[in-house]
Structure formats: C-alpha cells, structure tokens
Image (cartoon, grey):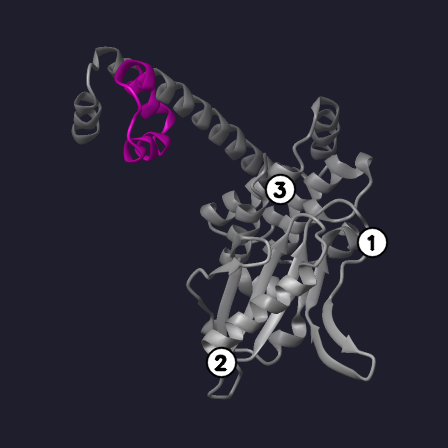
C-alpha cells in the first residue's frame, strides 16, 4: 500500500514555496517567501463521522511590505470523497477560530479516477437568502497535462508530473522526463532522493515499460543520460540496502526476540558494508546487549 498522504506531506513541507510558485503565482506576488512558519500539527475530531482528522500542511506567512500575517492551508486528497467540501469549510472555521488570521485554503487531488472536476466551494442557501459561500482552490492532477510542465524548472513540477494525466503507454517517457527535469535542478542529495523516490513510487514500471525506459534513456544526450543514471543507480543502491536491512532484522528477531524500535532505526541507517559486518557479527549474539555493544564499538 502506498502512503499517499505521507509522500505528499513530505513533498509539500520540503518544497512549499516551489509549490505555491508553480500553481499560485498570484500569491507569490504578495507574500514574503522567506517568512514561512509551519504551524503545529492540528488534530480535529469529526463528530459526525466519529473520526480524528489531521490537517496536512498549514503555514503562517507574511504579506509583503505589511506587518500582517495569513495562513495557507493545503490539504491532500488521494481519492474523491462526497462532502469533502464541507470538511474543508470545517477546517477553515476551526483554523480561523484558533488563529484569528485570514486563511487561504487549497486542496490537491492526486487520484487517477474519476476525471470529473472536483468541487471548489461549499454553500448554504435558503430560498430567500444565501447564508454562506466558501471558496477554495483545487489542484486536480488528473486534470493537468504533463506536457504543459516540461519547461518548469521547479522540483514540485518534476515530482507531480508522475501523477498528471497520461496515456498508459506514456508512463516510461513520463518517468524519463521527470528525471531529466530533476537532474537539471541544483538540489542537494537529500532533496533529489525525496523527489526521485516520489517519482519511482508512482511510476513503478513493469518489465516491458522498463525496457522502453532504458531504450529512451540511451537515446538522450550523453551528459544528461549520466545525470539520470546517477539518480537511477541511487534508487538501486537504496533498494538493495533496504532489502539487506530487512533480512538482518528478521535474523535478529529470530535470535534475540523483537528488536527495540530505536535499534531497528539504527540498523536501517547502516551502509551496505556495515550491514555485511553486522550480518557476520550477529551469529555470535545471544542477547540484545550484544547488539547494543556492537553499535557502541563499531
């Protein structure tokens, strides 16, 4: 199962200015880009549905050349949901009640189907009066053509192309295009890993698609091919390390019982060479203390 909400929250949290600049240039014209302050995670109880709802991304920002603030609330939806417009209004009302600031609400939809446009408002009307009209912006990725974003030097564009409208046979070329856009950006290794992982999750190619991808990759300019290959090689290396770590954890759980979460995290952060060393050393372990000692002495 793909954790859609986690992937989108990581993307938006790490590249929030780029997201706003890509889809909402009007906001970019009146906000202070460097004033972004992410608000603490908000948890609301939905009395009607009996569920706890966690807001995705809420950021407090400043108006340019003004001593005033506003909030941008961005919510991700991986599926179409009846009455979601009402929930967006509820989020708006509770944020406004808590912070007493203007709120700019946004929803980004990432579902593949249906293709019908999602609502962007919530209204309460009576025969003689309109009581409420609440409007919010919608970025519905399956309504966007990936070809329209090819000239965007924007890390969010390189990631979200993977979820835009495409024909099934276009998947290999869309993946290559996304990686080419990413390779041309001046990002640090952690940022490249985040976006490339996003692309690879949503464009996980089958064997036939992978052959087409490799053929297309071999046909591009050599320097560009090398940059893309560095990203692809990084995926492969990361995948191998994750597989090795899982194997080591299974062996340790079998010998020592359930390994503590803190130690599990340390194991998952080991390099391939360190995992190999641990794989040899664990043959002599009899208690968790032996594993802790190995980490202290390495």
Q: Distance between the residues labelled 1 and 3?
A: 24 Å
Residue at left 55%, top 59%? 47
In the image, residue 2 lies at what x, y percent?
Answer: 59, 38
- Whether the residues at callouts 1 and 3 have beta carbons within 8 Å, the answer is no
On whether residue 137 falls in the magenta region, the answer is no
Which is in the foreground here, disc 1 or disc 3? 1
* Residue that label 3 marks: 199
Q: Which of 234 and 50 is in front in this view?
A: 50
Mark carried by residue 100 = 2
Residue 223 shows in this picture:
no
Few, some or many C-alpha atoms within 10 Å of disc 1 (few <14, some 14-19, many ≥20)? few
Front residue of 114 and 178: 114
Q: Residue at the top extreme?
A: 283
Q: Which mark is residue 116?
A: 1
Q: Is residue 135 above or below residue 254?
A: below
Image spot of residue 226 (x, y percent): 59, 37
Which of 289/148 is in front? 289
- Spatial CA distance of label 1 from label 2 is 35 Å
């Amino acid at each position: 199962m793909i954790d859609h909400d986690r992937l989108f929250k990581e993307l938006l949290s790490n590249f929030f200015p780029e997201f706003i600049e890509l889809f909402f240039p009007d906001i970019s014209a009146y906000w202070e880009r460097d004033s972004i302050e992410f608000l603490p995670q908000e948890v609301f109880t939905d009395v009607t549905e009996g569920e706890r709802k966690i807001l995705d991304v809420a950021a407090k920002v400043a108006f340019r050349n003004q001593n005033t603030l506003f909030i941008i609330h961005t919510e991700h939806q991986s599926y179409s949901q009846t009455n979601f417009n009402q929930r967006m209004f509820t989020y708006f009302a509770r944020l406004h009640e808590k912070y007493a600031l203007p709120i700019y609400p946004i929803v980004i939809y990432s579902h593949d189907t249906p293709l019908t446009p999602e609502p962007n408002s919530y209204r309460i009307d009576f025969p003689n009066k309109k009581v409420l009209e609440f409007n919010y912006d919608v970025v519905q990725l399956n309504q966007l053509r990936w070809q329209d974003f090819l000239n965007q030097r924007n890390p969010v564009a390189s990631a979200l192309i993977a979820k835009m409208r495409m024909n099934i046979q276009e998947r290999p070329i869309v993946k290559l295009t996304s990686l080419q856009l990413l390779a041309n950006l001046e990002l640090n290794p952690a940022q490249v890993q985040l976006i490339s992982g996003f692309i690879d999750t949503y464009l996980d190619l089958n064997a036939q698609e992978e052959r087409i991808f490799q053929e297309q990759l071999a046909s591009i300019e050599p320097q560009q091919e090398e940059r893309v290959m560095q990203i692809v090689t990084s995926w492969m290396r990361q995948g191998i390390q994750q597989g090795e770590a899982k194997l080591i954890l299974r062996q340790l759980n079998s010998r020592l019982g359930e390994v503590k979460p803190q130690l599990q995290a340390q194991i998952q952060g080991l390099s391939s060479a360190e995992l190999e060393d641990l794989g040899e050393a664990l043959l002599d372990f009899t208690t968790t203390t032996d594993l802790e000692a190995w980490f202290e002495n390495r």
